Amino acid sequence: MKGYVFHGPGQSAWEEIPDPVIKDAGDAIVRVDAVTICGTDLHILKGDLPEVRPGTVLGHEAVGEIVEVGGEVHAVRPGDRVLVSCISACGRCRYCWEKAYGQCRGGGGWILGHLVDGTQAEYVRVPFADLSLHALPGGLDAKDAVLLADIFPTGYEVGVLNGHVHPGDTVAVVGAGPVGLAAIATAQLYAPGRVVAVDVAAARLDAARELGADAVVDAREEPEQLVTDLTDGLGADVVIEAVGVPETFELCTRMVRPGGHVANVGVHGRPVTLHLEDLWIRNVTITTGLVDTYSTPTLLRMAAAGRLPTSSLVTHVFPLERMEEAYDVFSHAADTGALKVVLGEERHDVVAVRAA
């Protein structure tokens, strides 16, 4: 089979690799029908995550069909159409008992495309299949479902829930990429007073408006002043950082009100200065976190009921064999207008779903 292999910073290729096999009794082998590229994959290619070894197949989001299971897999079986979660869970450690699956100490956590071969391939081995695969509700399209493997749980759990969004709140989301847009969409579940989106790309700000942002602002045009004006000088109740660079994190800490929350979602590849000399007296709460995906079953039900605008984030669709081209489109989002790129086995031509 073929897969997208990381060979070191700046080096990767879609190439022939061995077929995955069952290694543990809890494993499942999934034929990949739809997969997507995450901003974290770009961080890996930049060398921001040195624990990813050369030779690793990238990717941690997929939808597919089970073709084989180990002897201790009971919740799913061959032929089932499933969502492959970005987080694997052993189900036995303290963190899994607390549904903090991202911190699993029994061999799980974020391992796909990180510590073991991932989903950007024709087939993938999924450890701990009973807790790491979710049977798809009937009729849910793969293009919709694949965004629930990581993007929507991350924006919802690490952004909206960690940020403690409440009715009437002013919520500022810095970074209107896929995760930021998912945070904007799921923040609506809590009836905020207003949502402000901050980005540098006009296409992403347009997408933010479509998903419910009440105001948008170019990050280069004094977003702090806009938030100040909208809140009578107080600041935002919740600020969600969805970029992962020092400048945007520091911007978030300046936009939040006294007693407010900064929810950091972005993956940071460089150190960030924490200005406690300014923050301590303002009673600001800062949260960080890897997604736990405990919300995935709920989000799947909502998507099946048409309550989540999942596929509206998909701007480009490619066949699997054009993985390298898809990476190029996604990594140049400012020029291509790419939000979320989906690749599927059955597709034969690239489709620009949303005008750039």
Image (spheres, rainbow, N blue to C red):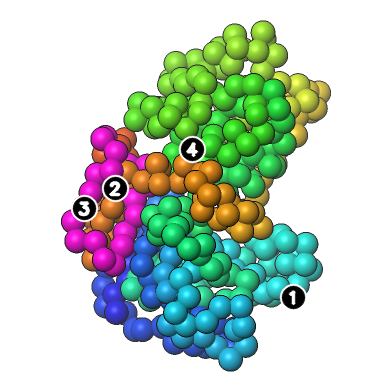
Label 2: which residue?
316
Residue 127 position (above or below residue 69): above
Label 4: which residue?
181
Q: Residues within 10 Å of mark 2 (few under 14, many from 20)?
A: many
Identity, as a three-letter code, of the amino acid under mark 3 = Val
Answer whether labels 2 and 1 touch (C-beta < 8 Å): no
Residue drawn at 70 percent across, 73 percent down: 91
Answer whether labels 4 and 3 touch (C-beta < 8 Å): no
Q: Residues within 10 Å of mark 4 (few under 14, many from 20)?
A: many
Q: Is residue 275 left or right of residue 341?
A: right
**Mark 2 or mark 1: whose residue is earlier in sequence:** 1
**Front-most of residues 6 and 36:** 36
Residue 51: percent from left, percent from top: 52, 65
- At mark 2, the secondary structure is strand
Q: CA distance from mark 1 to mark 3?
A: 43 Å
Q: Which residues are magenta?
A: 338-356
Residue drawn at 65 percent across, 29 percent down: 191
Label 1: which residue?
92
Q: Main secondary structure of the magenta part?
A: loop
Q: CA distance from mark 4 to mark 3?
A: 23 Å
